[in-house]
């Protein structure tokens, strides 16, 4: 499937509907007549859409799960160049745009139909409701959903997605590109690791007890060993300071900070599997000054000094002021 960086599906809230419906077509999936789901098309239906029943059968066979409900696929022109299709787990609306090649269209259709299959078995909307108040948790849940869908695309369409899911070594990158590489790339590798360890039953269990931290997506061995969440680390306080709030930013945020700047981007790979946890504390001192103190805990101190330097460089660019950093055993403490 070409153009993967702009295939942003996710679970999106659709705020507008179609004003014109050119045609409606109904086809049946190749399942027993008593439970046969139907596919209804709306919009200007491309010729390749007639393969949708075969796609349903392929997805069911590949995943070992059957569609339980009818699907309606809406075809519409592409309004946003960064959006080729989506599945809305709240409204159950599945949309595929008609821009791009037939190959891309079929890939988007397969991807979004797979989200519908996931939703019919695992209630994707409820998964996001559970995680929506914790960004790192929600990012991890989204990576599970998108990673499995991209694995379906990769294996059923024989597309080596991971060969393209790499950060460019030079130049600026957008947060969206970094997010796509994580959701689709790291998510895919996480699902692969879980399936290799315990088959599809183990993948089913992920939806019942999803990882609540992005570090568990990036390091599947931790999830497979039984971790489901990470605890905050202690934010050290001076005698005249009060901790007013603390937040785990997560390994995704740690890596993104370094990835944004070309000069610190090489350090992303050097993190490896050394991240344990982090906590950003907001403090006030006796004068009422607000202080940010971010503690990043690692299990490998070999490159801790270079990482500390990289974090200060990256933060200085974002904050437009120079933070200070110190290392304490296996922790980096950043302050601004």
Image (spheres, rainbow, N blue to C red):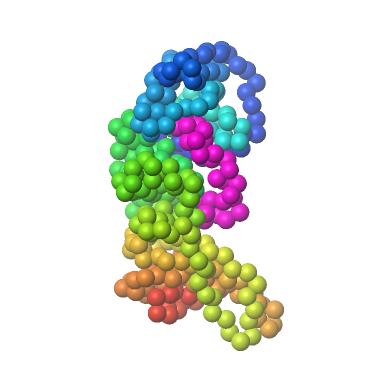
Q: Is 16 placed left or right of 128 in the picture? A: right
What x and y, as percent, mark residue 240?
64, 85
Q: How many marks do you count on the picture?
A: 0
In which quadrant of the rendered image does the N terminus lie?
top left
Vertical order, 319 against 204 (above or below):
below
Vertical order, 327 against 185 (above or below):
below
Q: Residue 110 magenta-drawn?
A: no
In which quadrant of the rendered image does the C terminus lie?
bottom right
Vertical order, 324 against 132 (above or below):
below
Q: Is 38 placed left or right of 184 in the picture? A: right
What x and y, as percent, mark residue 247?
57, 65
Q: Main structural element of the magenta stretch: helix, strand or loop?
A: helix
**Residue range corresponding to the magenta coloring:** 113-139
Residue that appears at 41% across and 53% down = 217
What x and y, as percent, mark residue 325?
47, 76
Residue that appears at 50% across and 55% down = 212
Q: Depth check: 288 or 237 in front? A: 237
Residue that appears at 57% across and 34% down = 88
Q: Depth check: 178 or 239 in front? A: 239
């Amino acid at each position: 499937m070409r153009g993967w960086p702009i295939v942003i599906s996710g679970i999106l809230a659709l705020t507008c509907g179609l004003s014109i419906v050119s045609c409606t077509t109904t086809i049946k999936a190749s399942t027993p007549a008593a439970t046969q789901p139907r596919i209804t098309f709306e919009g200007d239906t491309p010729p390749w859409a007639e393969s949708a029943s075969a796609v349903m059968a392929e997805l069911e066979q590949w995943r070992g799960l059957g569609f339980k409900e009818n699907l309606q696929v809406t075809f519409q022109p592409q309004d946003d160049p960064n959006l080729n299709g989506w599945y809305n787990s709240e409204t159950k609306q599945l949309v595929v745009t008609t821009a791009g090649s037939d190959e891309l269209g079929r890939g988007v259709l397969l991807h979004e139909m797979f989200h519908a299959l996931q939703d019919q078995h695992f209630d994707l909307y409820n998964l996001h409701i559970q995680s929506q108040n914790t960004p790192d948790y929600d990012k991890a849940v989204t990576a599970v959903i998108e990673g499995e869908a991209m694995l379906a695309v990769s294996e059923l369409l024989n597309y080596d997605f991971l060969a393209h899911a790499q950060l460019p070594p030079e130049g600026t990158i957008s947060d969206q590109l970094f997010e796509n590489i994580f959701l689709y790339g790291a998510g895919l590798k996480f699902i692969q690791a879980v399936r290799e360890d315990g088959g599809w039953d183990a993948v089913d269990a992920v939806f019942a007890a999803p990882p609540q931290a992005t570090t568990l997506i990036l390091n599947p061995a931790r999830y497979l060993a039984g971790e489901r969440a990470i605890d905050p680390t202690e934010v050290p306080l001076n005698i005249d300071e009060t901790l007013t709030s603390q937040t785990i930013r997560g390994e995704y945020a740690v890596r993104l900070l370094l990835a944004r700047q070309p000069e610190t981007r090489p350090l992303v790979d050097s993190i490896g599997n050394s991240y344990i946890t982090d906590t950003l504390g907001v403090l006030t001192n006796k004068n009422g000054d607000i202080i940010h103190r971010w503690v990043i805990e690692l299990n490998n101190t070999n490159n801790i000094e270079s990482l500390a330097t990289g974090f200060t460089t990256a933060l200085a660019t974002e904050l437009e002021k120079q933070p200070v950093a110190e290392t304490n055993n296996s922790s980096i403490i950043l302050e601004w």
